[in-house]
Amino acid sequence: MNFLARLTISVLILGTSYLFAHGKNHHVNDMWDVFPFSTQERNGANKKANDFFEDVHSYIDYCEYPLPTDADYDRTHFCHNLCELLSNENECPLEAKSISFGDHRMFYHWGWVPGSDLEKNRHYKALRENVSIACSNNRDCEKRFFDMLTDQKRKRDKHLRDQYAVFIGKNNFENLSKKEQKEGDAFISVLYAVHILGDYTTVQGDKHTQTFKSLINDLDKAFSTLAGGRTSLANNLTTKITLATTSTSSDPNDFFSIHQKGQIALRILKEEFKDFLYECGYKKKFKDLNYKLK
């Protein structure tokens, strides 16, 4: 199948609602479709799950985080310039540089990497390039910006992790066992990937986001953590996604677009992740937490 045919099929599959935008409701609904909680109890027994899903979305998409309790989740919360990323814009070392909608993806669309070096980590390439331009390649300016941003990111990471603790009936991530903390980061990583995969299906594709290869690596690590000693379960799920999104054709023009990869991987997660969790023993764990399941 040639490139034009694949592109036509991609457009038909994705539809205009996915092609041009993937907003808050799309992202959170995708999370509900992937995870095993009953949507009928979204505002009842499963409200903590809904709150957690919305918090992951807010962390990724909004400069203002955590959002006020009365927030409307609209686009006014997106980052409009680099200085808005910092807790104190007045101390921003560079001139505020406006960005267009879609370019907000250079902020926090890099996968779940708590505690990483923002200036050096491979996930932050687009952000580093824009900061370098805004600082006119002044290293002192760049360092000051990233020092401030690292401090802000640390606060965001802590809040999101604490929201996971609330999700499992606890109050503070730091008070969880090491095993519970690893599981928490794994669950956040999966939810993060669901959000990014949704973004792949839009017209911006993977512009400024984590790469598909990096995302699959993150999912593989998350699956392995959640599976515990059941290595084959994790490997099987990763392999299924990898094979389904890899072309076996020798024709260099016969490949899956990023839109198709996002759609395919998301579909597999929606079809397979619930049963994967159940096989790993999480059905009982969620029931013990009084969640209502599918």
Image (cartoon, rainbow, N blue to C red):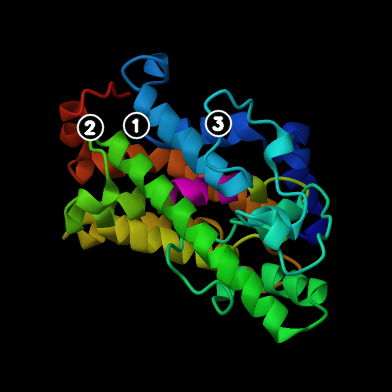
Disc 2, SS: helix
Count up the numbered dots.
3
| Residue toward you, 164 or 210 | 164
- In percent of width and height, residue 108 lies at 59, 56
Q: Quadrant of the N terminus?
A: bottom right
The location of residue 153, given as percent across then percent down, is 51, 59
Amino acid of disc 1: Pro
Q: Would you place residue 75 above or below residue 90 in this image?
A: above
Badge 1 or badge 3: first in the primary sequence: 1
Q: Position of residue 185 (x, y in %)?
A: 34, 54
Could you tell which of marks 2 and 3 lies nearer the N-terminus? 3
Foreground of the two, 22 or 80? 80
Q: Quadrant of the C terminus?
A: top left
Using the numbered discs, state the Cα–Cα distance from disc 2 to disc 3 in whole angstroms: 28 Å
Question: CA separation, marks 2 and 1?
Answer: 9 Å
Q: Which residue is mark 1?
A: 36
Nearest to the observer: residue 44 or residue 242 = 44
Q: Which secondary structure, mark 3?
A: loop
Q: Is residue 293 above or below residue 278?
A: above
Drawn side of residue 40 relative to residue 61, left or right: left
Q: Which residue is mark 2?
A: 286
Q: Which residue is mark 3?
A: 68
Asked if residue 199 is positioned above or below residue 151 in the image, the reply reads above
Sequence order check: which comes first, mark 2 or mark 1? Answer: 1
For the question of whether residue 31 can be seen, the reply is no
